Image (spheres, coloured by chain):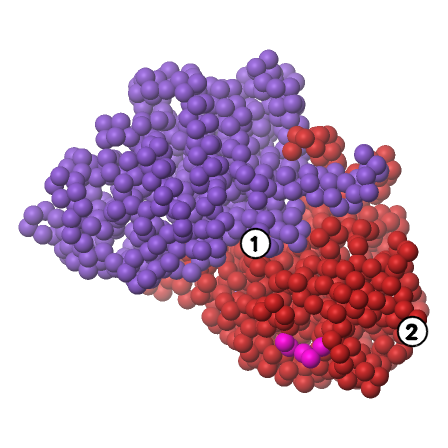
Chain colours: A red, B purple
Amino acid sequence: MIPFQAPTEEMNFLLRQVFDAAAVWQGLPAIAELLDLDTATAILEEGAKFCAEQIQPLNQPGDTQGVSFNGLSVKTPDGYAAVFRQYAEGGWVGLCGEPEYGGMGMPKMLGVLLDEMGYSASNAFTLYAALTAGAALCIHAHGSEALKALYLPKLYSGEWAGAMDMTEPQSGSDLRTIATRAVPQSDGSYRISGSKMFITGGDHDLTSNVIHLVLAKIQGSDGISLFLVPKFKVTADGEIGDANGVTVGAVEHKMGLKGSATCVMNYDDAEGYLIGRANRGLVCMFTMMNYERLSIGIQGLGSAQMAYQLSASYAKERLQGLAAGGSPTGAKADPIIVHGDVRRMLLNIRALTDAGRALAVMTGMQLDKAKYAADSEEQQQATRFAALLTPVAKAFLSDRGFDACVTAQQVFGGHGYIGETGIEQLVRDARIAQIYEGTNGIQAIDFLGRKLVGDNLATVTEFFSWLQQQQSCDEVFASQKQQLQQLQQRFVDVIAAVNQQKHDQPALINAVAVDALDAFGYLLYGHFWLMMADKSLKAAAQLPVAFVQRKQQLMQYYFAKLLPRVSLHLDVVTAGDETIMQLSADDF
Amino acid sequence: MIPFQAPTEEMNFLLRQVFDAAAVWQGLPAIAELLDLDTATAILEEGAKFCAEQIQPLNQPGDTQGVSFNGLSVKTPDGYAAVFRQYAEGGWVGLCGEPEYGGMGMPKMLGVLLDEMGYSASNAFTLYAALTAGAALCIHAHGSEALKALYLPKLYSGEWAGAMDMTEPQSGSDLRTIATRAVPQSDGSYRISGSKMFITGGDHDLTSNVIHLVLAKIQGSDGISLFLVPKFKVTADGEIGDANGVTVGAVEHKMGLKGSATCVMNYDDAEGYLIGRANRGLVCMFTMMNYERLSIGIQGLGSAQMAYQLSASYAKERLQGLAAGGSPTGAKADPIIVHGDVRRMLLNIRALTDAGRALAVMTGMQLDKAKYAADSEEQQQATRFAALLTPVAKAFLSDRGFDACVTAQQVFGGHGYIGETGIEQLVRDARIAQIYEGTNGIQAIDFLGRKLVGDNLATVTEFFSWLQQQQSCDEVFASQKQQLQQLQQRFVDVIAAVNQQKHDQPALINAVAVDALDAFGYLLYGHFWLMMADKSLKAAAQLPVAFVQRKQQLMQYYFAKLLPRVSLHLDVVTAGDETIMQLSADDF
């Protein structure tokens, strides 16, 4: 397997030229005092090095060995614990955490790029850190001062890890029916009893404590509340205390992500502490969920990037057949990169991955503005845009990520189906990103039902105008710009029609949501390609000639070969829900 | 896991109503004397029973246990050998084999349906039989009388198994560079030396002998020849003799299909017997390959059918959320089949699988006519149509099959990612069908380059006319018929343009082939849905009311939601190869 090379040139291009991070950060005082572009570049380089040298070597052995469970506790694959310690000591877990509690205070706009590298190097390993950072985010947003002071420093430092405990056998996408109970105690704490399943990182040997955020119902109430339930109780001075009635019931055997522990968790009168208000647990949990949703989208993106590197490298080495029209070198067999169909596969991956990275960075940027912007109008707008983009980032990045892995596997031919090339592991690992943290169907319903028609298209219209302002495009791109505008108008018209029909056709939103999200995703990527082509041309003096040219060529490829998918998905939305709903359940 | 139920109602409908097998078989004397519709139905029922009761129970344990290799020989998972013996004794391996040598002489039009059931029940198990039947086909078509007499009866009876030994490390899609050598001996035999890889069923304990069909170059020649190389030599009276210098070098660790042995094979002066003429081995091998290609398409189809059953059953049981507009039963949670997005996923699988079965049966029918038709014009036309349809059946059925498994996995949510539901195994098993027996990219290039433009669209035009004649559609389908005709005309125009451009743009065929094949596949499925809707309506008196209604509803779904894909793929073909070929290899 080739060593992972983080695409830092692409990352710097997005930060510097496409999204003008310098200007963005200038507008966010809390960031500006910590970070400039050169520091950002240095952080990217440092992260790239750690991912390539420390994390990636764990990935394939970790898949083969998997996690093990002895009935009491979970052991991660060899090497995970030592590298996680280094990773934590390097400050990577707390990269975007609050400086007040020991975090590094970096913007998400930068954090997404480090996340991507981590997932490229190892899906399974990186997930432990992502959950920890997400748990910290939730505790910071909703926890009491006492909880923050006690738990955040240890989470940011990676001494402890976090987990999100929501699912129960009867409650997956639908959390109304959870049965885990919380009994109030006289000291203000709660006793938690019940059982959860599919708990990623529910137990492991990477850290000395695991901090569970558990959804439960307070005795006598049907509302859902959120509790912090540590594996080991924590003393008042922040040290590990007694075991807390939190045990592992089983570890799942999964298709992939075998280095990540997916646990059944049991709580037996475990001590828990309310986070946020009683019966408002879903709101609190969604703070973590939204964070994780972006992270899981980036799992797809990182997987796609690694899949691209593996398959492009293989295509340049593997000799099979001759170029159409004869070998350019007169060789007996050419590298398969000469074949149009192999190029088509690689270009599909590349064009979608580069644009996907732009989506990740832009979503990160909106989160940063929502958190740090001094101007309240800007702050509120960014909050709306982050809410609009989060389900798209989760679903579209993870769907395209899985597609990318499968396509890359196809480039390998038969060698793609055996373990040693590493690509089949990526396919297995990336698949889960379409499912967990809310299936991509759930994301699409959130996107269409709440984010698009929930406010009668107000936010999406505002977003399209804002996007327009980012694009003071060169004349050479006039035809692409016009093409996008026409497609965008059609998107708005189609969604407006859905908005009108939704009351008479209650099943409509659910039935056409996935195609609505896909149409939006491919349209948005068209904008990103236009921006990347334009900004690279404008910055041609500072960029390598080949880089600028490639951006133009990939933009042309995207518009010729992938943008047509917008119309297909809009056609499918327009076809409505009649043919979907008319069959009786028995007819399936 | 739910027990597999072969879709015999659908299968009988295709034979009886859609393709009028009774009339077809009347026109093929060799078939007519062996088979009528009632016998066919009885064979389907018998096969369905065997697949459900004997084969399916092996599938999940076989995946967990996998094949094992002790350095000398391969052991299949527990139960495989005993069930294979029963399967062979039931005559299933030789179902479509030559009666002259002990085969049952059944038409492929029926055989494809039994293949589908087998793959639904277990991809890994059924593959051993498929390769054996394919090897027999090749030996029958090209082998000497002596070879036929000695080997065919034992292959048809399933006492021995077959394998196809083509790939070498440096020779996969491109066989020009194979290095395995054959040295002529004075007795007319050859000594084979070399090594092959990715040999499915290269060794196992299901049968007492494995008959390898090996591609090699005769000493002093660069042409490729085909040899029969048995694992054990066979005495003149057909008994097992000495070992033959055929050994297993290794067994691959694969993403799936773990019950199927994928071997590195070594030949050390192994005795081999020329099949067909020297230096004409590829022609002979393609007899087997074309057979296997259809079979591998059906691996995709069978996987899709099983994926549908698993996911539809789960969707009717799993309670999550409420129907849009309120629960129809007033329950606290409804089965997820009420949700539009879940229905969309199931309908995509169902609509493509039912039409896929029609493709399999129609391709089988052409093969039967090509083999048995008394009328030579009909026979030659069928040969052309079978050649046109084979790459489509291989690629489109296996691509849609994998999609179906992934979609079905999504219906399961988190439960789809863990082993126990069985769906993740299907995803892993079905993936290989897109790769082996010629990748789907290779199929597409064959389809567009040879089958469509190779004769300036003569065959495809003839095929479309023939298809038209099959459809004396009812007036109620006028709009669908018109829609298909317009799309078909556009398909012909787009491919005709490719045909014109191909000389100036040598890379064009390779670059747009996959989209051309997909456009054809979705168009063809439109025809099949029209035929199924029409024929079910015409035969409404003999069919259950719900069956006829479902066919109308699925046809409407297909036209509304899936047929639009034809235009997308044609758009992509029309966009040509410029944006694909302009990047230099270094830019990837």
Q: Quadrant of residue A270?
A: bottom right
Residue at left 72%, top 42%? B336
- In front of the other: B87 or B27: B87
Quickly name the residue at label 2. A187
- Please tell me whether mark 2 sits on a helix, a strand or a loop: loop
Where residue A190 sits: x, y (%)? 86, 68
Q: Quadrant of the N terminus of chain B?
A: top right
Query: Total number of numbered labels?
Result: 2
| Residue range corresponding to the magenta coloring | A205-209
Within 10 Å of disc 2 (Cα), the crowding (few <14, some 14-19, many 20+) is few
Where residue A28 sits: x, y (%)? 85, 77
Q: Look at the image and tell me whether residue A232 can be seen.
A: yes
Residue at left 87%, top 49%? A454
Chain letter for mark 2, please.
A
Quickly name the residue at label 1. B419
- Please tell me whether mark 1 sits on a helix, a strand or a loop: helix
Using residue A478 as the reference point, say whether residue B348 is left or right of it. left
How far apart are the alpha carbons under marks 2 and 1? 43 Å
- Is A549 magenta? The answer is no
Using residue B391 as the reference point, say whether residue A368 is left or right of it. right
- Is A206 magenta? The answer is yes
What amino acid does circle 1 point to? Gly
Q: Quadrant of residue B532?
A: top right
Within 10 Å of disc 1 (Cα), the crowding (few <14, some 14-19, many 20+) is some
What amino acid does circle 2 point to? Asp
